[in-house]
Image: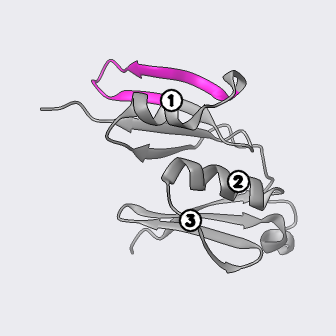
Amino acid sequence: MSFASIRIVTDDLDGLVAFYERVTGQQAERPAPVFAQFSGPGGVLAIASTATVAMLGGAVVPGTNRSVVVEFEVPDVDGEFARLRLDPGDVVLAPTTMPWGNRSALVRDPDGNVVNLFSRPVR
């Protein structure tokens, strides 16, 4: 078995895609109007409209995540945090050095999902 992707389902596909295009600095692949994805060496972040899960009978509800963190390793947490120019209400944790040494900034995407921009300590 190999890991394929994490998919975020949303009622605002274009808004979420625009946010992750800003975060990643890359343009999303859009193979269909209801689906987008960002491919990278660590895996795929997929973003899909609620239309793609209509047959699941409410098993997937956009904007309700309170347990999963989307993480991006970046070379300069403080620089990326500054570049994004987020509204203060979207900041969960400003750039901070964690007790285990990682530098992290946690923010919310437009659907309220937590996104961690982090770098590992230099060894």
Q: Nearer the viewer, mark 3 or mark 2?
A: 3
Q: Amino acid at mark 1?
A: Ala
- What residue is shown with label 3? 27
Q: Which residue is at 77% across, 43% downward?
A: 64
Question: In what element is the residue under mark 2?
Answer: helix
- Could you tell me how many numbered marks the image carries? 3
Q: Main secondary structure of the magenta part?
A: strand
Q: Nearer the viewer, mark 1 or mark 2?
A: 1
Classed neighbour count for the residue bearing mark 3: other residues with Cα under 10 Å, few (<14), some (14–19), many (≥20): some
- What residue is shown with label 1? 82
- The spot of residue 79 in percent (x, y) is 41, 32
Decide if residue 89 is on the left or right side of residue 11. Answer: left
Up-down: is 81 above or below 56?
above
Q: Nearer the viewer, residue 36 or 87?
A: 87
Classed neighbour count for the residue bearing mark 2: other residues with Cα under 10 Å, few (<14), some (14–19), many (≥20): many
Q: Does the residue at mark 1 contact the one at mark 2 (Cβ under 8 Å)?
A: no
Q: Which residue is at 39% across, 73% downward?
A: 2
Which quadrant: the N terminus? bottom left
Q: Amino acid at mark 3?
A: Gln
- The spot of residue 16 in percent (x, y) is 70, 53
Which quadrant: the C terminus? top left
Decide if residue 21 is on the left or right side of residue 58. Answer: left
Classed neighbour count for the residue bearing mark 1: other residues with Cα under 10 Å, few (<14), some (14–19), many (≥20): few
Q: Which residues are magenta?
A: 90-105
**Which badge, 1 or 3, comes first in the chain's sequence?**
3
Q: Which residue is at 67% across, 37% downward?
A: 66
User: Disc number at residue 117?
Assistant: none
Up-down: is 67 above or below 88?
below
Q: Nearer the viewer, residue 13 or 26?
A: 26
Up-down: is 10 above or below 54?
above
- What residue is shown with label 2? 16
